[in-house]
Image (tube, rainbow, N blue to C red):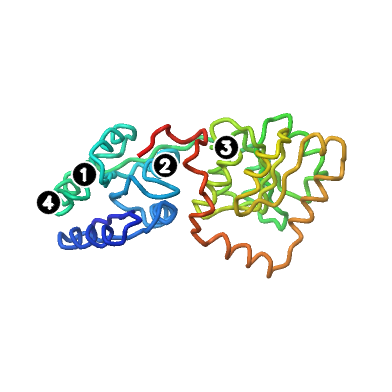
Amino acid sequence: MKKILIIDDDEGTRLLISHLLKAKGYETILAKNGIEGIRMALNHHPDLITVDVMMPYLNGLNLMKILTMMQLEIPSIFVTVKEEAEKYKDAFPYIKSFCLKGDLKEKLVGLVEKAIDLPDRGYTDIEYTLKENEIFDLLGKSDRKKILIVTDNDTFDLVTIMLGETDIYELYHAPDGLEAVFKAVMLNPDLILSDIDLPKINGISLARILFILGHPFPLIYLSEKADIETIKKASSMEGIQGYLLKSEVRNNETLLQERVEQILDISDEQKKALQASYKAADIDKIGEFESGSSIWLSLSP
């Protein structure tokens, strides 16, 4: 049985689409916002997605941008109330068609049948590098805390020195935000140290994407930026445990080590409470997604 994920913030539209598709023998999964939609896409591997273009916070365009970035090649259909939204269809390789909400009863099933019968979707390999010591750390069993350091090579070398002996921590490196997303999900680190200015995806967007994916790991920013606006924006997401200036770290050899130890030395009860807060798909936490992060398309539905 083909599985279809329905993502729409309007309950009536979700139920209507589900009714139409179930009548044709499809299994349906319903998501009431973009965060739930992405998490369900990762967990349920649907054969097709119908996605509302105009949703608050994480609209259909930004949702598709994340799926494309994650290289999830899932055939999708835009559902919208505005005819002009058809122009967005060509912005994404896996959007097969669009359907006005007023035409759902007459046209949606036909569009779904046409899109879902296309050749099976493929999967694109994600390329990133693991150093030899990182591979051995992953293969071995260890009680050491895993720390993912997302920054340039020079800062990584500095942090490695600051954190001292490597038999205390397992240190992993990602030179850009996109690689950091995949390494974070793969490694399940105890802590992430991340720069703000990163290639491909900046540090703030990295935290937001990990939150959407259900993995907002404890994260400390390590940055040259000292302006209040950046610090405030960087501190607004779940999982952010601190903001350190590189100049402060260079001038105080123990500052980074002390901050890392403080965060990693928490009780089991605190860990459970933190994990519980991560599971909540609170769309208010990503209220700034539509305001222009470097990874989002400059489109407005």
Residue 17 lies, with reference to residue 71, above or below; the image says below
Residue identifier under label 1: 115
Residue identifier under label 4: 106
Among numbered discs 1 and 2, the one appearing first in the sequence: 2
Labels 4 & 3 near each other (Cβ < 8 A): no
Q: Position of residue 223 (x, y in %)?
A: 71, 36
Labels 1 & 4 near each other (Cβ < 8 A): no
Among numbered discs 4 and 3, the one appearing first in the sequence: 4
For the residues labelled 4 and 3, the Cα–Cα distance comes to 43 Å
Label 3 packing within 10 angstroms: few (<14), some (14-19), many (20+): many
Q: Nearer the viewer, mark 4 or mark 3?
A: 4
Q: Residue at x 78, y 56 (%)?
A: 262
Give the side of residue 1 with respect to residue 124, left or right.
left
Residue identifier under label 3: 177
For the residues labelled 1 and 2, the Cα–Cα distance comes to 21 Å
Please state, as top left, top right, bottom left or bottom right, where the C terminus lies in the image: top left
Q: Looking at numbered disc 1 in the image, what kind of residue is underneath it?
A: Ala
Among numbered discs 1 and 4, the one appearing first in the sequence: 4
Q: Position of residue 210 (x, y in %)?
A: 54, 49
Q: Looking at numbered disc 3 in the image, what kind of residue is underneath it?
A: Gly
Q: Nearer the viewer, mark 3 or mark 2?
A: 2
Residue identifier under label 2: 62
Give 97 or 217, whichever is nearer the viewer: 97
For the residues labelled 1 and 4, the Cα–Cα distance comes to 16 Å
Residue 22 lies, with reference to residue 60, above or below; the image says below
For the residues labelled 4 and 2, the Cα–Cα distance comes to 28 Å
